[in-house]
Amino acid sequence: FSRTIAKGPDTTTWIWNLHADAHDFDSHTNDLEEISRKVFSAHFGQLSIIFLWLSGMYFHGARFSNYEAWLSDPTHIRPSAQVVWPIVGQEILNGDVGGGGSEEYK
C-alpha cells in the first residue's frame, strides 16, 4: 500500500468522488429551498425512469401475449402474459397454454 498512490490520480478514488460530490447537496449551497428542489427533482427523475421501465413491461406483456388467440377460442386456449420463443427447448413452456408461438402446439 502506497499513500502517495492512494491520494493521486492513479486510483479510482477520484471517480467515486465525482459521484459522491454530485449528490452532496450541502457542499454546494446552504439554501434549504435549493437543496429541496434538487432532491425532489432527482426523486421525480428516478420515478420517471421507473415508470418508463414499467410501461415497457406492460407494453411488451400485452404485445407478445396470446390474447387474440384466446379470444378466438377461449375454451381450449389459456391466457398467457408472454409467449416464450423457441430458442433452446423453451417452447415447452408454451405447451400448456395453447395458441403460443410454437407450431406443434397450435
Image (tube, grey):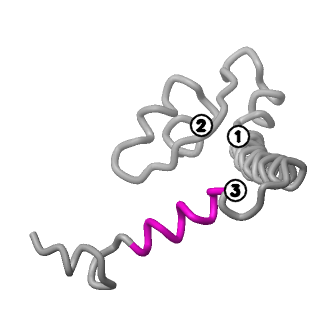
Q: Which mark is residue 101?
A: none
Disc 2 to disc 3, how far (Cα)? 59 Å
Q: Main secondary structure of the magenta part?
A: helix
Residue at the right extreme, as displayed = 33
Quarter holding the N terminus is: bottom left
Residue lying at 52% horizontally and 43% vertically, measured from the top left: 84
Camera-side mark, 2 or 3: 3
**Nearest to the observer: residue 17 or residue 62:** 17
Amino acid type for the residue under numbered disc 3:
Phe
Is 16 inside the magenta-drawn segment? yes
Within the image, what quadrant is residue 30 found in? Answer: bottom right
Residue at numbered disc 1: 61
Within the image, what quadrant is residue 79 found in? Answer: top right
Amino acid type for the residue under numbered disc 2:
Lys
Residue at numbered disc 2: 106
Residue lying at 77% horizontally and 61% vertically, measured from the top left: 29
Q: Would you call the spot at circle 3 few (<14 residues within 10 Å), some (14-19), or many (20 or more)?
A: some
Labels 1 and 2: the sequence-earlier one: 1
**Nearest to the observer: residue 70 or residue 24:** 24
Q: Which residues are magenta?
A: 14-26
Query: Measured from the top left, where is residue 73 in percent x and y?
Result: 77, 24
Labels 2 and 3: the sequence-earlier one: 3
